Each structure stands twice: as C-alpha cells, then as structure tokens.
Amino acid sequence: MFIVGVRRLRIAAAVLLACLALNLLIPALVSAQRALPLPSTTTATYDGPVPYSLEVSYTRGATRGEVAIEARMLIDATEHRDSYTARADTALPVDDRPGLTYLFPAVPRPRSYPYADPFASGAVPLDYVGPGNVAGVETYQYRAVVDEGDYQAERIIDLERRTGRVLDETWSTADGLFRLSEESRRAAVDTARGSVRMLRGFEVLSWLSRAVAVLTLAWLAVAVARR
C-alpha cells in the first residue's frame, strides 16, 4: 500500500508540474500568436472614386523591440511613400511621428489613441466609438477626424479585439469615400479568425490545466487527511 501511495504521489507531482509548465508556457504562446511576423508585408485595396491600394512592409528595427514600417500608397496611379519606426509592444512611434498610423496595439482597448494620418502633419484623437462586427468577428470601432487646412478627412477603423488587426476601414475625403475592398476585408477576417481560434484554444488549455491542478491538490489533501 505504501508503494502504491508513493506512486500516486509521484503521478500527482508530475501532473502538477505539467500544469505549472503549461501555465508558464501559454503566455509566451499567446504573445507569439499576437506578435507581428517580421519581416512581413500586407497589401490592401480600397473601393472608391479612384483606384487606391496600400502596401505596408514590417521589418525589425535597429533596436530590439522596434518595428521599421515602410508604406507605399498608390492613389489613381500617384505614388505616396511613408515610413517610421514603432515599438512592437505598444505600436506607438519611437521617432518624431505623433501617433499610430498603420500598426495598432496587439490588444486594443476601448479608449482613444493618438492617430497620425499619413496626409496630415499632426496627430488627432482616434476615438473609440463602440463595439463593431465584421463578417461575424467582433471588433472595436474607432473614428478620427482630420481638419488641417486643405485636407479634411474622416477615418473609421475596425480593429479585431484580440489581435489589433484592421478588418475594415473607411476613409472619407473631399474626393469621396474609400472603403477597404471586400476581397481585402475577407482576407483580413480569415487571418483574424485563425488567430482568434488559436488564442481561444490557449485560453481553454490554460483553464483546464488550472482545473486539473486544483483537483489534484484536492485529491492530495484528502489522501493526506486519510493517512
């Protein structure tokens, strides 16, 4: 009986160590799932009064934890380029840019952020306006209004709540309304759904490992009390 008891104790200890290891590993897996792959390039097209496409490249910055961002916009065959460096963890610029532009926090919050429109010189508030939904995926919706001399614009951006990915965007200017094309929205939603499934799986695994640890500790307490 003593040998059996020792074996059970060893099994219980192994279960507790496995649960502890999982709970230490899962946060790293979650961070890796939310992290922007470097290097990577995203492309998007917009429906509007004239052809508009956006290509953004992300590479490792000169300093650890930074992301170098290069954007190429093609509006009615006219090319516009933009670049800056941001912190990977907050998406906030580390240079003289006053706010977010192409990269957003991996876990967006229902609050305001400083936003730097690529066609304006300063920053404006990117205000949280409420929950949204793009093709069944829950989002936080934000709105920025720019009024700077000859340039007036409104941007409405839907960010996936667990990853910060842009799932939809409208850009209203004096020239008309541009919106992320259906093809680009569908591609963004498909990518987001895969990430959300993984994150939910990690959450379930974390909850299960904690439940197993609690049950194992309860069993140990009962076993010790009966000795």
Image (cartoon, rainbow, N blue to C red):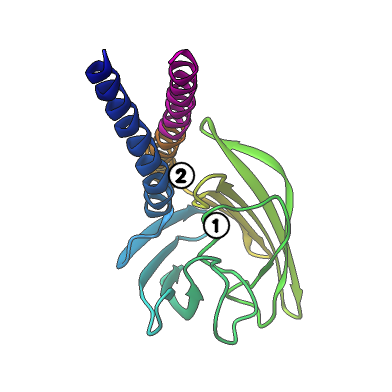
Q: Secondary structure at mark 2?
A: helix
Classified by dominant secondary structure, the portion drawn in magenta counts as helix
Residue 156, horizontal then vertical, whole percent: 65, 53
User: For residue 213: magenta?
Assistant: yes
At x 68%, y 39%, the residue is 131
Q: Is residue 141 left or right of 212 when viewed as pictured? A: right
What residue is shown with label 2? 185
Residue 186 shown left or right of residue 40 in the figure = right
Asked whether 18 or 3 is in front, the reply is: 3
Q: Nearer the viewer, mark 2 or mark 1?
A: 2
Q: Residues within 10 Å of mark 2 (few under 14, many from 20)?
A: many
The amino acid sitting under disc 1 is Pro
Q: Position of residue 77 (x, y in %)?
A: 41, 71
What's the residue at 63%, 64% (across, down)? 175
Residue 141 locus on image (x, y percent): 66, 47
Q: Residue at x 64, y 45 (%)?
A: 140
Numbered mark located on residue 49 in the image: 1
Where does the magenta region start and end?
Answer: 204-227
Seen at 76% across and 81% down, the residue is 149
- Do the residues under discs 2 and 1 have CB atoms within 8 angstroms? no
Q: Amino acid type of disc 2?
A: Arg
Number of on-image labels? 2
**Which element carries disc 1, helix, strand or loop?**
loop
Dot 1 alpha-carbon crowd within 10 angstroms: few under 14, some 14 to 19, many 20 or more: few
Say above or below: 218 vs 187. above
Which of pointers 2 and 1 lies earlier in the amino acid sequence? 1
Q: Mark 2 to mark 1: distance in Å?
A: 18 Å
Percent x, y for residue 14? 29, 33
